[in-house]
Image: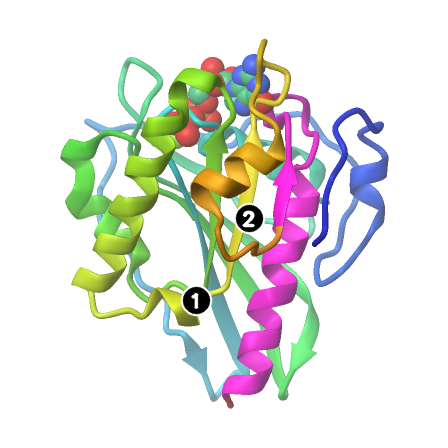
Amino acid sequence: MPRCPVGGSRQDFWKAGRGLHVGSSRKGGGLRYHAEAAPFRLIEMPHYNTASREVTLKIVYYGPGVGGKTTNLEQVFQMLDPGIRGRLLEVKNSGERTLFFDMLPVEGSKVLKGFQVRFHLYTVPGQVYYNATRRKVLENVDGIIFVADSTPDRLEANQEALQNMYDNLSDIGLDASEIPLVFQYNKQDRPGALPDHILDEALNPEHVPAFLAVASEGIGVMDTLQQAILMVEQQFGQSR
Ligand SMILES: Nc1nc2c(ncn2[C@@H]2O[C@H](COP(=O)(O)OP(=O)(O)O)[C@@H](O)[C@H]2O)c(=O)[nH]1
Ligand SMILES: [Mg+2]
């Protein structure tokens, strides 16, 4: 199972260019819309555009509130070459919580089955009362990154969010077993952070790939995404 030891330099996480162009780090926030002003509509890209030979694959960051999903997207945004990533759309409320979702478009480096691959990375809102939005974001999902919070008192919240994810997938008619899933055990810098074997036992009985991370430091962020991309691309390659 691919593992990402905590403690390597950030540079280590920028090296491997599997499926993505990984470029120089560039600071600078994305677009930030306040919910009141945002023209909220979840725009569904066509999955395939046979005329232009493009495919957009959707990867969703799921997990409990304040686990680090938005932080992952912000870090990806900062680490990627501006030439291959679009604007980061964040829809937040005044308390800095994700109100609807965040979205980042990223150009892939591959042509698969004659299609130029592009990714749309989404996060879901944490709070349960936004469940309809979570479900909407999960529609047409091609791969999921479950960002778990390794803080000991968040174990139950992780389990609830995971169950909620399976329930929502089932409610919208998707078979979870067919969707590539990667875990990220985030906040490994927290005092008493749970080790991977405990989190595997609680959340990941099938031992799908899991990565340790400190998303706020950029650690483990690209490894997690690269693994998800690899699995999503493999699935796409087999599906057509
Ligand atoms: N200590 C620590 N804090 C983190 C880490 N990742 C994210 N955070 C913080 O946790 C809070 C919630 O993160 P956010 O990305 O908004 O969570 P979301 O609700 O899952 O989108 C923010 O204050 C982040 O800075 C981490 O690895 N370690
Ligand atoms: Mg968020």
Question: Which corner quadrant of the image does residue 191 belong to?
Answer: top right
Disc 2 CB within 8 Å of nearest ligand 2 atom = no
Q: Measuring 19% from the left and 33% from the top, which residue is drawn there? A: 128
> Where is residue 239 shown, x and y percent of the image?
50, 86
Answer left or right for 84 relative to 167. Answer: right
> Where is residue 147 shown, x and y percent of the image?
48, 38
> Where is residue 27 shown, x and y percent of the image?
68, 25
**How many angstroms separate mark 2 from mark 1 (CA)?**
25 Å
Residue 213 lies in the magenta stretch = yes
Q: What number is the disc on residue 96? A: none
Question: Along the line of sight, which residue is nearer the eye, 169 or 222?
Answer: 169
Question: Which corner quadrant of the image does residue 11 belong to?
Answer: top right
Answer left or right for 2 relative to 66. Answer: right
Q: What number is the disc on residue 179? A: 1
Please, what secondary structure does the residue beneath circle 1 have? loop
Q: Nearer the viewer, mark 2 or mark 1?
A: 1
**Residue 42 shows up from this direction:** no
Answer left or right for 102 relative to 99. Answer: right
Q: Residues within 10 Å of mark 2 (few under 14, many from 20)?
A: some
Question: Along the line of sight, which residue is nearer the eye, 100 or 195?
Answer: 195
Q: Measuring 72% from the left and 51% from the top, which residue is drawn there? A: 2
Q: Measuring 30% from the left and 49% from the top, which residue is drawn there? A: 165
**Location of mark 2 (residue):** 86
Disc 1 CB within 8 Å of nearest ligand 1 atom = no
Where 90 sits versus 86, above or below?
above
- Mark toward the start of the polypeptide (2 vs 1): 2
**Residue 120 shows up from this direction:** yes
Q: Residues within 10 Å of mark 1 (few under 14, many from 20)?
A: some
Q: Measuring 68% from the left and 78% from the top, which residue is drawn there? A: 111
Q: Amino acid at mark 2?
A: Gly
Residue 118 lies in the magenta stretch = no
